[in-house]
Amino acid sequence: MSVCSAHATSGHQTSTAWPPKARLTAHLVASPVCSPSRAGLLTGRYPQRTGIVGVLRDHHDAIGLDLDERTIADQLSAAGYETALIGKWHGIPETYRPLQRGFAHAFGFLSGTIDYYTHLSRGGGRKGLPVLSRDGEPFESEGYFPDRLADEVVRYLSAPHEQPFFLFYSLGLPHTPLQAPPDSQARSDAAVYRAMVERLDRNVGRALDVLDRTGLAENTLVVFLSDHGWDVRRRGGPGSNRPFRGGKYQLTEGGLRTPTLARWPSRIPAGRTLDEPSIALDWLPTFREAAKVSAPPPNPLDGVSLLGYLTSGEVPPPRTLFWAFRDDLTGTPASYAARRGRWKYLRVGDREALYNLDADPGETRDLSGPQPEIFRALQDAVERWRAEVGEPQWVSKPPPPAEP
C-alpha cells in the first residue's frame, strides 16, 4: 500500500477535476499559518510540541522542526517505504532539510515562497536568492515552477518502485505571489488566482492519471488538503473562505477549516461525505495504520487514525481538539480555541466566545451566556491543555539591533 499526500497552500478553492472518494467537511489544520500547520501534519503532534509555532520568516531562518521530532517520512522509511518530498519545504538550515528528516528524495524549494517565474526566494531568510534543491544539491530551472514540480511528480510516480512509497507533494499553488501560468491570458487578480487554481487542478490530475495508468491507484491512499485558509487581510483579494469567518492568522473556521479529500479506490467507498471533526494531526496515525506500521511512534501522538472512518464510517471516539496562536508582526494577540463535537470555544486576547458550529458555522452568535456549563468546561479544558503544551511564546517581530 502506498501513500500520496497532495498539499496545497493558502487557499480554500479545491480541484473540480477530481471526483473525491471521500470528502471531509469538518477537517481542520493544526495552525492558521503555514509553518506550524505543516509541522503538525508531518509529526501528528500539536505544533507547540515541535518548536514551530509561527511562520519561519527571514529573522527565524536558523530555526527548524525540533530534532527530537520524527516525521511521517522517518517512520514510514523505517517500515520499509520509499519516501519523497516534491515541492515546498520551508526550512533553510542544513540540519532541518528534508534529507535529514526522513525523505530519501527531495526536489523543490527550501523557503516559504518563491517567484514562480524566476525561482528566487521571496522570504524565509533568502529573499532574492536561489533556493531550489534536488537531493541536497542546488540546481537551476526554467519555466513556470509549479509545472516543474508536476513534471517531477509524474517522473517519480512513473518510475518502477520495488517498495511501497510515501510521496509528500507540496504544490505551492495557490500561495502568493499571484502569478498566472505563462499560457494564461489572465490579467486581474481574480482571473490570475483562478488560473492558478485551475493549474493546481491540472497538476494534481496529472499525478492521479499516472496512478491510474500504472495500476497503482487501487492500492494508493491519496489525501488532498490545504495548510490554512485565505488571508482575508487582503481586502478585495481573489480568495474566499465563505461561508466561514476570518482566515489566515486567525483561529476562526476561515483560518482552520480547509477542503480535504481522500481517495483509495479499493478501500474508500465512492462519494462518501464525512462530517465529524478531524484534524491534520490525524493523518500520521492514519498512514501508520494503513501501512501496518507495528513499531510504536517515537513520540506520543495527538491525532487518531481515521482509517476506519474513511473506509467503513467508524466514527472516531469523542475528543477535544485544541489550538493556540499569536503573531506580533500582524498584531494577532494570544489566541486559543477548542472544539468538542459541535461546540467551539474561542479566545482572542481577552475576548471569549462559544459557538455551535452545526447551527452557526460562520461563528456569528456567541452562546457563552445561554450555555455557561459548556463554555466553562471548554474554557477549563483549554487551560489544562495550555499547562501541558506551554504558551505560544513565538515573537514574530525581528529582534532589535544590538547596541553600538
Image (cartoon, rainbow, N blue to C red):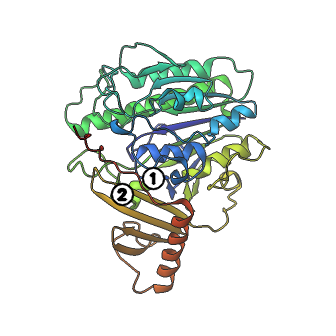
Left or right: where 88 falls relative to 288: left
Q: Amino acid at mark 1?
A: Ser
The part of the image, by quadrant, that contains residue 162 is top right
Query: Residue 29, position in %: x, y?
Result: 49, 52
Do we see residue 342 in this rendering?
no
Residue denoted by label 2? 250
State how many labels appear: 2
Disc 2 element: loop
- Who is closer to the viewer here, 30 or 50? 50
Instruction: Identify the residue at horizontal 49%, vertical 67% (top origin).
Output: 338
- Relative to 300, does residue 186 appear above or below in the rendering? above
Q: Residue furthest right?
A: 294
Gap between marks 2 and 1 measured at Cα: 9 Å
x, y (%) of residue 249? Answer: 35, 53
Tell me residue 227's x, y (percent): 45, 45
In the displayed structure, 240 sits above or below 58; it is below
Query: Which label sits on residue 31?
Result: 1
Classify mark 2: residues with Cα within 10 Å, few (<14), some (14-19) or many (20+).
Answer: many
Residue 108 shows in the view: yes
Quadrant, the C terminus: top left
Q: Residue at x 53, y 66 (%)?
A: 387
Quadrant for residue 116, please give it: top left
Side of 331 relative to 314 (left or right): left
